[in-house]
Image (spheres, helix red, strand yellow):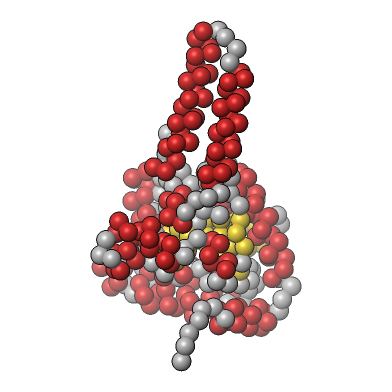
Amino acid sequence: MAKYILEFEKPLRELEEKIEATKVTALERGVDMSREIQSLQDKLAKASTDFYTRLTRWQRVQVARHPQRPYTMDYIQRITEHWFELHGDRHFGDDKAVVGGLAVIDGQKVVIMGQQKGRGIRDNLYRNFGMPNPEGYRKALRLMQLAAKFKLPVISFIDTPGAYPGLGAEERGQAQAIARNLMEMATLPVPLIVIIIGEGASGGALGMGMGDRLLMLENTWFSVISPEGCASILWRDAGQAESAADAMKVAPTDLVEMGICDRVLPEPAGGAHQDVEMVAATVKAALLEILSELQKLPADELVALRIKRYEQMGQWQE
C-alpha cells in the first residue's frame, strides 16, 4: 500500500522528498553527499518528534483514522501464541465488524474481542467499516459469558466510528443490545481490560468498552459522539469538527485528567502504523501487567471496584 499522507503531515513529507532527491542526485552524479543527507535526516527526525508531540486534538483524531493504522487483528496476530476465533451470536448471524475468540498470551488464557475495520473498499464493506450491528454486540456478549463460565479474563479492543445506524440494525434491537452489554459488563465476574487502539465513538464503543481498566494509545480518541456529529448538532456545520474536538476533550490526556482513562500507551512519531511491532509489544506488556494485578482480586471485590469506578465518574448537581 502506498504511503498515505494526512494533510497536516505535508511539511514533513516535503522534507522526506528532499532527502530522496538528494540521494538520487548523489547516485546520478557519483558524488558523496552523505553529510547533506545526514543533516536532512537529523532535521526530519527532530521535526517529527517536535511535530507529533504537539498535535491538536483534531489532528489526533485524524491519526486515529489513518487507513494504515493497525487494527484489532493486527494486534491479535502479534501478541498471541494461539488464537481460535468464534463466530455468530446464535440469534441472527455473524457480524464481521466484530471479531472475538479464545487466545493465549504468554501462557495466559484469555478471551479477546474487538471491532475490526477493513483495508480498501471491498474489505471495508465486508467489515462494515468497523460499525457493529446488534448481532456484533450479541457476539461480544456471548464471548463475555463464555469467559465468565470458564473464569477467563476478557480483553476488548475498541476501534469504531460508532454502532451501525441502519434501519435493519434498529429493527433488530441495536440500542437494546448495547444496553444489555453495559449491564452484563458491569457485573462480569472476571477481569475486563479495555484498550482503545483507534476511534472510540459513542455507544458503539461503549457497548464493548466498559471494564476494570481503560487504556488508550497515544493517538486515539474516545467520546460520546464524533467531532463531526457534535459540530453538526451544535453549529449545524460539520466543518467545525476541530472546535468540537476541543470542546469535548476527546484526547487521551483529557480522559486521564477526567479519571476515565487509566494509562496512555506511547506511539512512535507519526502514529502506530510507523512501527506496528513496537506498539504491539507495548500493548502486550501493559496487558500482561494489568492482568497480573487484576487476577489477584476475588470476583466479588473485582465487581465492587468496577461499579465504584463508574460511580465516581462525572459531576452533577441536585
Q: Nearer the viewer, residue 133 or 29?
A: 29
Count of residue discs: 0
Q: Is residue 173 left or right of residue 28?
A: left
Residue 269 shows up from this direction: no
Residue displayed at 68% across by 65% down: 291
Q: Position of residue 311 (x, y in %)?
A: 55, 83
Outermost residue to the right: 296
Q: Nearer the viewer, residue 229 or 2?
A: 229
Res. 191 image quadrant: bottom right
Residue displayed at 35% across by 72% down: 174
For the N terminus, the image quarter is top left
Q: Nearer the viewer, residue 275 or 318?
A: 318
Q: Is residue 176 left or right of residue 141?
A: left
Residue displayed at 56% across by 54% down: 218
Outermost residue to the top: 30
Q: Position of residue 102 (x, y in %)?
A: 58, 60
Residue displayed at 34% across by 66% down: 230
Q: Nearer the viewer, residue 290 or 84?
A: 290
Residue 180 shows up from this direction: yes
Residue 148 versus residue 68 in the image, above or below: below
Q: Position of residue 271 (x, y in %)?
A: 52, 46
Q: Position of residue 158 (x, y in %)?
A: 49, 61
